[in-house]
Amino acid sequence: MTDIEAVKKRHQAIIQQLSDPELISDWEKFEELSKEKLRLDKVIDKYQGLEEIKRRVQENQLLITSKEDPELVSLAEGELSQLRERQRAIENEISALETTELLLNEENFQEDNRQRQETYSDVIIEIRAGTGGEEAALFASDLYRMYSRYAELAGFKSQILDSKPTDIGGIKEITFEIAGENVFSKMKNEGGVHRVQRIPSTEKSGRIHTSTATVAVLPKPKKSEIKIRSDELKIDFYRASGPGGQYVNKRETAVRITHLPSGIVVTSQTERNQLKNKEGAMSILEVRLLEKKRSEEARSFSGKRNTQIGGAKRAEKIRTYNFPQDRVTDHRIKKSWHNLEKIIDGDLNQIISALQKTDAERAI
């Protein structure tokens, strides 16, 4: 079995590291240490239980050997049998913990998550039309509505930061924020290529089309994580473009911000005044800079847009929305759900829960 003293020493070292205020800025290291501490907590608890059983076994053996009180000896002999059985059971549990690296069941995982919340909560989501022309843009619009409705039903707040609509109601691309408790833990698995199979409203022959849209889920950084100096920015104002609207092309309310050191360019034109659009553009810029930072460090687990969306080809999919068969299939967990219209209307709880369950089973 494991050297329990070495385990205790490592456990104490982890506690000291977790108490360092600066560690919270390194979210991946913090999560890694938290998981290891949970494993060691359970191993230590089992060993402590085993030591207590061994102590009681020894006491009963001494009592039986003394033969001072026949009645107590009889009780000790009965208890000794139970204690040895319990000792074997605990030893088997410890062995299982060590050989399986303490795989947690769903109930334990949920409790652990309550004790150690995700470092990031709010997210910024980017949806882009992929393969399929105008139908892909319409599908991107459907995905935005699905997530915004989910946010509304869950009691989260959502806000569009930038959008490029099409003339017939589709969306070329849209960037929006969802804020609320544990949003990132719920939304992080939505990043990837989404595929739709349906008969477009523009299709006269009734032929089923396949189109795609890409989704990137980006954790919104804490203010202390990303430092942006004003002299690093080039800010331009211009007239908003897009279909319709009395405010479009009337005033220079749209904002374009260029981050000179990185070359990253972001825009925002959804609001009617420059200040709000500037705030939206800055939020997008902060997320892009965090993504770049994590990517360069090769330590991002969901921040790499290329990992999430690939090349936006039809085959590179995480989920398919099949309207003729009224079915949504997540290909990562090989699970399907029906009542597609309800799902598109924001009822994502079953899908998100299934993905979180899979995360729990793979967590450690």
Image (cartoon, grey):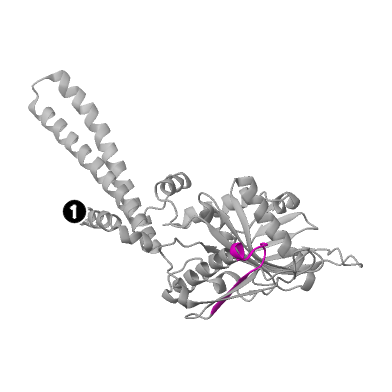
Image quadrant where one finds the C terminus: bottom left
Q: Position of residue 324 (x, y in %)?
A: 80, 58
283 with respect to 229 (left or right) = right
* Viewer-proximal residue among 257 and 61: 257
- The residue lying at 62 percent from left, 52 percent from top is 351
Q: Residue at x 39, y 58 (%)?
A: 31
| Percent x, y of residue 190 | 59, 60
What residue occupies the far front of the structure in this picture? 251
Q: Is residue 241 left or right of residue 316?
A: right
Between residues 196 and 284, which one lies in front from this camera angle? 284
Closer to us: 176 or 353: 176
Q: Would residue 268 be counted in the magenta stretch?
A: yes
Residue 252 picture location, percent across and down:
68, 71
Answer with left or right where residue 36 lies relative to residue 163. left
- Range of magenta residues: 264-277
Vertical order, 129 against 358 (above or below): below
Residue 222 inside the magenta-drawn segment: no
Looking at the rendered structure, the kind of residue marked 1 is Glu
- Residue 181 appears left or right of 85: right
